[in-house]
Image (cartoon, grey):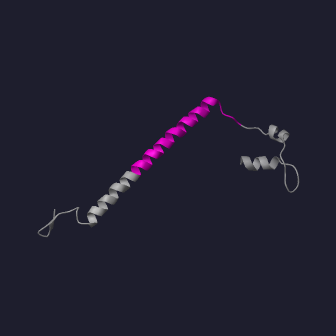
Amino acid sequence: MLYDDLRSLGRGGNQPNLNLGLLKKYETIIPPINLQNQFATRIVQIELQKQQAQTALAKSEQLFQGLLQQAFSGNLCHFDAGEIT
Protein backbone atom coordinates (compact mmCIF):
# COMPACT_ATOMS: atom_id res chain seq x y z
CA MET A 1 0.00 0.00 0.00
CA LEU A 2 2.91 2.36 0.53
CA TYR A 3 3.42 2.70 -3.23
CA ASP A 4 -0.23 3.60 -3.82
CA ASP A 5 -0.23 5.97 -0.86
CA LEU A 6 2.82 7.81 -2.17
CA ARG A 7 1.40 7.96 -5.71
CA SER A 8 -1.77 9.52 -4.35
CA LEU A 9 0.33 12.41 -2.97
CA GLY A 10 1.63 13.26 -6.44
CA ARG A 11 0.50 16.46 -8.12
CA GLY A 12 0.05 17.04 -11.81
CA GLY A 13 -1.89 15.68 -14.76
CA ASN A 14 -0.71 12.72 -16.80
CA GLN A 15 2.53 12.26 -14.89
CA PRO A 16 2.08 13.24 -11.25
CA ASN A 17 5.25 14.34 -9.49
CA LEU A 18 6.33 14.14 -5.89
CA ASN A 19 8.44 16.80 -4.30
CA LEU A 20 10.42 16.83 -1.07
CA GLY A 21 7.76 18.85 0.71
CA LEU A 22 5.11 16.23 -0.02
CA LEU A 23 7.39 13.42 1.09
CA LYS A 24 8.30 15.17 4.35
CA LYS A 25 4.60 15.39 5.22
CA TYR A 26 4.18 11.63 4.78
CA GLU A 27 4.28 9.90 8.16
CA THR A 28 6.17 6.65 8.50
CA ILE A 29 6.39 4.33 11.48
CA ILE A 30 9.90 3.27 12.41
CA PRO A 31 10.08 0.65 15.17
CA PRO A 32 12.72 1.00 17.88
CA ILE A 33 16.14 -0.42 16.99
CA ASN A 34 15.83 -3.24 19.55
CA LEU A 35 12.68 -4.49 17.80
CA GLN A 36 14.40 -4.19 14.42
CA ASN A 37 17.31 -6.26 15.78
CA GLN A 38 14.95 -8.88 17.24
CA PHE A 39 13.22 -9.14 13.89
CA ALA A 40 16.55 -9.51 12.06
CA THR A 41 17.65 -12.23 14.50
CA ARG A 42 14.44 -14.17 13.93
CA ILE A 43 14.80 -13.88 10.17
CA VAL A 44 18.33 -15.33 10.40
CA GLN A 45 17.03 -18.21 12.55
CA ILE A 46 14.18 -18.90 10.14
CA GLU A 47 16.53 -18.89 7.15
CA LEU A 48 18.82 -21.35 8.96
CA GLN A 49 15.88 -23.65 9.75
CA LYS A 50 14.73 -23.39 6.15
CA GLN A 51 18.19 -24.40 4.90
CA GLN A 52 18.31 -27.33 7.34
CA ALA A 53 14.88 -28.52 6.17
CA GLN A 54 15.92 -28.26 2.52
CA THR A 55 19.11 -30.25 3.23
CA ALA A 56 17.14 -32.93 5.09
CA LEU A 57 14.62 -33.12 2.25
CA ALA A 58 17.37 -33.52 -0.34
CA LYS A 59 19.00 -36.29 1.73
CA SER A 60 15.65 -38.07 2.14
CA GLU A 61 15.05 -37.85 -1.60
CA GLN A 62 18.49 -39.35 -2.29
CA LEU A 63 17.83 -42.21 0.14
CA PHE A 64 14.41 -42.87 -1.36
CA GLN A 65 15.79 -42.90 -4.91
CA GLY A 66 18.48 -45.36 -3.80
CA LEU A 67 15.85 -47.59 -2.21
CA LEU A 68 13.76 -47.50 -5.37
CA GLN A 69 16.77 -48.41 -7.46
CA GLN A 70 17.54 -51.39 -5.21
CA ALA A 71 13.90 -52.50 -5.25
CA PHE A 72 13.56 -52.41 -9.02
CA SER A 73 16.92 -54.09 -9.62
CA GLY A 74 15.97 -56.99 -7.35
CA ASN A 75 18.61 -56.21 -4.72
CA LEU A 76 16.15 -55.33 -1.99
CA CYS A 77 14.75 -58.85 -1.37
CA HIS A 78 16.18 -62.35 -1.63
CA PHE A 79 14.20 -64.88 -3.59
CA ASP A 80 14.82 -68.38 -2.32
CA ALA A 81 12.72 -71.31 -3.47
CA GLY A 82 9.84 -69.07 -4.41
CA GLU A 83 9.66 -67.32 -1.04
CA ILE A 84 10.45 -63.73 -0.25
CA THR A 85 12.75 -63.37 2.75
Residue 74 is left or right of residue 14, and the answer is: left
Residue 19 is left or right of residue 40, and the answer is: right
| Residue 81 point in image, percent of width and height | 11, 69
In the displayed orientation, state which residue is furthest to the left: 81
What residue appears at the point 73 percent right and 49 percent down from the top-left corner?
3
Residue 34 is left or right of residue 70, and the answer is: right
In the displayed orientation, state which residue is furthest to the right: 13
Q: Is-magenta flag for residue 38? A: yes
Please say if 45 is above or below 69. above
What residue appears at the point 43 percent right and 47 percent down from the top-left corner?
53
Q: How many marks?
A: 0
Depth check: 56 or 2 in front? 56
Please say if 34 is above or below 48. above
| Residue 75 point in image, percent of width and height | 22, 63
| Residue 18 point in image, percent of width and height | 83, 46
- Main SS of residues in magenta: helix
Where residue 72 sits, quadrant-wise, is: bottom left
Where residue 15 sits, quadrant-wise, is: bottom right
Q: Is-magenta flag for residue 44? A: yes
What residue appears at the point 79 percent right and 49 percent down from the top-left corner?
7
| Residue 39 point in image, percent of width and height | 57, 36
Q: What range is drawn magenta here? A: 29-57
